[in-house]
Image (cartoon, rainbow, N blue to C red):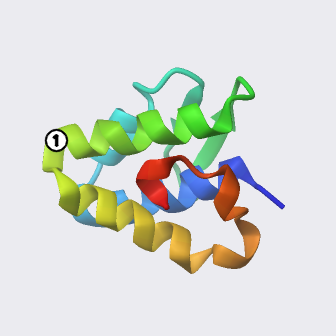
Amino acid sequence: MFDLKLIIKSIVEHQQAVIGPLAIEQANKVPGIKVDDGVDLKVNVTGDNTSKILDELVKKYEVLFGQASVEVCKDAIKEIKSKVDIDKLPQILQ
């Protein structure tokens, strides 16, 4: 099972805990991702290249805050591990 929306939501929520609203702003700069903030984050994804979308999302955060942001993304993945096919993740998240 590979729920891209769940993975993106988890990553954005973890980043949001560290960097606040900037997490959503950066996620929305990734082609194929639209995150709406509200009571609960809503994630919409267009496109089917899941690895590329996740790679670009993580790299957006990495550009701003370095390897620490990548580690936050990896932690987000670990929390939902049972719902993630590790082989489908980009190298940066493995």
**In this view, 3 is above or below 14:** above
In this rendering, the count of numbered labels is 1
Question: What residue do we see at 31% from left, 36% from top?
Answer: 60
Residue 6 in which image quadrant:
bottom right
Q: Position of residue 73 (x, y in %)?
A: 40, 61
Question: From the viewer's perspective, is 29 left or right of 80?
Answer: left
Question: What residue do we see at 46% from left, 57% from top?
Answer: 93
Question: What residue do we see at 70% from left, 25% from top?
Answer: 46
Question: From the viewer's perspective, is 68 left or right of 55?
Answer: left
Residue 34 in which image quadrant:
top right
Q: Position of residue 50 (x, y in %)?
A: 66, 37
Question: What residue do we see at 40% from left, 25% from top?
Answer: 29
Look at the numbered disc 1 and give the secondary structure of its residue. helix
Q: Check the picture and name the quadrant holding the N terminus.
A: bottom right
Q: Position of residue 3 (x, y in %)?
A: 75, 54
Q: Which residue is mark 1?
A: 64
The three-letter amino acid code for the residue at tag 1 is Leu
Q: Position of residue 92 (x, y in %)?
A: 41, 51
Q: Residues within 10 Å of mark 1 (few under 14, many from 20)?
A: few
Residue at the extreme left of the image, as rendered: 65
**In this view, 78 is above or below 52:** below
